[in-house]
Image (tube, helix red, strand yellow):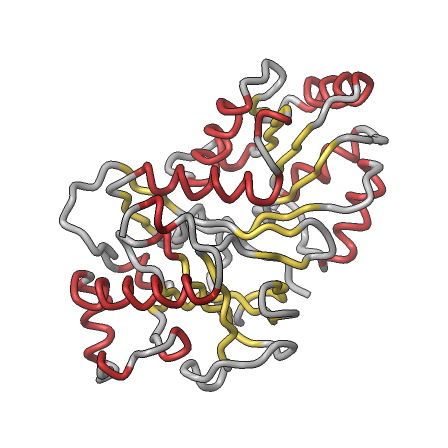
């Protein structure tokens, strides 16, 4: 499948067709996924809809090289994790797929990035190597072609001055930040931002106690003077992101889909409104694995919207740790 075809999916029929095609490809070409399917004694001929596709547990990205191609690895994205924990490794053989995915996705939800000054408050991500989030935000900053766009490590005075200046000028701003750093920022300054999207990427990084989403977003909306807090749902093991424009309700781009599995029976799919484990189909993962059983808990609201509820007990606390509710 060509990249253009992948990112031009228009409806569920297109998605199902392409997902089944990629499943057939990865079930043969991905050695880790092939062994997993054989262990489950899956009859590949019986997989005729996406709800029958077995999902690879996300832990395999920590222990195996998950690839569906023999092309050379040109980049490896690493999860952050905490000291002593093994990191997930997402080996990339074609960065053009990742770039097309996050750029097309951003534009689908927010329009051209050139409309914004992109301010990134991601200190913990900048302090390590191999972050897929940093790669994405760096590209968005460059594509914005805005001299006000940029990264901020822990220079709160500069970002406070920049936010006030851009707000006074009526400029559109995207402020994307790790959760604890956004909280640090509003403890230093109280804002009343009129044209700014505040987007949190989750994660306290051990700097603060975890908070329920409603409490966190109430603090952030009050501190920044905005009506809603946006969120990004992504992870090292995915090349696509879902976005929430408020109230913690996320939506996927056209080439990504969420399926909720029963926590007691991982092969049973739950209907909207029922809480369970989050399975992700990310067709941009064509060269790794597109069918991943995450350690996140959530529920579907509608056929296209979902909510994150937390993580399974005993899961590793990692960089993209989600807010437990």
For the view shown, which residue lies furthest in the left direction? 70
User: Residue 108 location in percent, x, y?
Assistant: 56, 44
Q: Nearer the viewer, residue 142 or 129?
A: 142
User: In the picture shown, does residue 321 fall above or below 309?
Assistant: above
Residue drawn at (27%, 60%), measured in percent from left and top? 63
Between 226 and 172, which is closer to the camera in this rendering? Answer: 172
Residue 222 drawn at (x, y percent): 85, 42
Residue 75 shown left or right of residue 58 in the figure: left
Query: In the image, is 277 to the left or to the right of 165?
Result: left
Image-based side of 35 in relation to 129, left or right: left
Residue 251: quarter of image: bottom right
- Residue 27 horizontal side relative to residue 178, left or right: left
Residue found 50% across the figure and 65% down from its top: 258
Is 316 rendered above or below residue 115? Answer: below
Name the residue at 28% across, 38% down: 75
Q: Quadrant of the C terminus?
A: bottom right
Observer-nearest of 302 and 148: 302
Is residue 137 visible in this depiction of the protein? yes
The image shows a total of numbered marks equal to 0
Location of residue 278 in the rendering, given as x and y in whole percent from the top left corner: 50, 68
Q: Residue at x 56, y 34 (%)?
A: 122
Depicted 215 relative to depicted 197: above or below: below
Whether residue 87 can be seen here: no
Q: Position of residue 36 (x, y in %)?
A: 24, 73
Q: Quadrant of residue 78?
A: top left
């Amino acid at each position: 499948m060509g990249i253009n075809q992948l990112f031009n999916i228009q409806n569920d029929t297109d998605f199902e067709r392409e997902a089944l095609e990629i499943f057939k490809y990865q079930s043969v070409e991905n050695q880790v996924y092939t062994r997993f399917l054989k262990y489950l004694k899956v009859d590949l001929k019986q997989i005729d809809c996406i709800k029958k596709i077995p999902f690879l547990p996300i832990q395999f990205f920590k222990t195996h090289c998950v690839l569906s191609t023999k092309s050379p690895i040109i980049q490896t994205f690493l999860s952050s994790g905490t000291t002593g924990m093994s990191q997930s490794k997402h080996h990339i053989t074609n960065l053009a797929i990742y770039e097309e995915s996050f750029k097309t996705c951003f534009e689908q939800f927010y329009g051209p990035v050139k409309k914004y000054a992109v301010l990134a408050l991601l200190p913990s991500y900048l302090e390590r190597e191999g972050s897929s989030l940093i790669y994405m935000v760096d590209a968005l900053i460059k594509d914005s072609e805005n001299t006000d766009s940029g990264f901020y490590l822990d220079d709160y005075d500069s970002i406070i001055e920049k936010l006030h200046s851009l707000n006074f000028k009526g400029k559109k701003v995207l402020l994307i930040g790790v959760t604890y750093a956004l909280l640090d920022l509003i403890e230093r300054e109280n804002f009343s931002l009129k044209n700014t999207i505040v987007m949190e990427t989750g994660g306290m990084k051990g700097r603060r106690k975890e908070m329920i989403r409603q409490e966190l977003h109430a603090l952030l909306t009050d501190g920044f003077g905005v009506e809603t807090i946006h969120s990004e749902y992504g992870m090292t093991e995915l090349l696509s992101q879902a976005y929430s424009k408020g109230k913690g309700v996320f939506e996927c781009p056209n080439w990504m889909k969420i399926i909720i599995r029963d926590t007691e029976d991982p092969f049973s799919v739950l209907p909207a409104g029922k809480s369970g484990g989050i399975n992700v189909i990310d067709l941009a993962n064509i060269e790794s694995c597109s069918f991943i059983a995450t350690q996140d808990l959530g529920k579907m609201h509608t056929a296209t919207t979902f909510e994150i509820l937390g993580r399974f007990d005993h899961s590793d606390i990692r960089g993209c740790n989600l807010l437990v509710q």
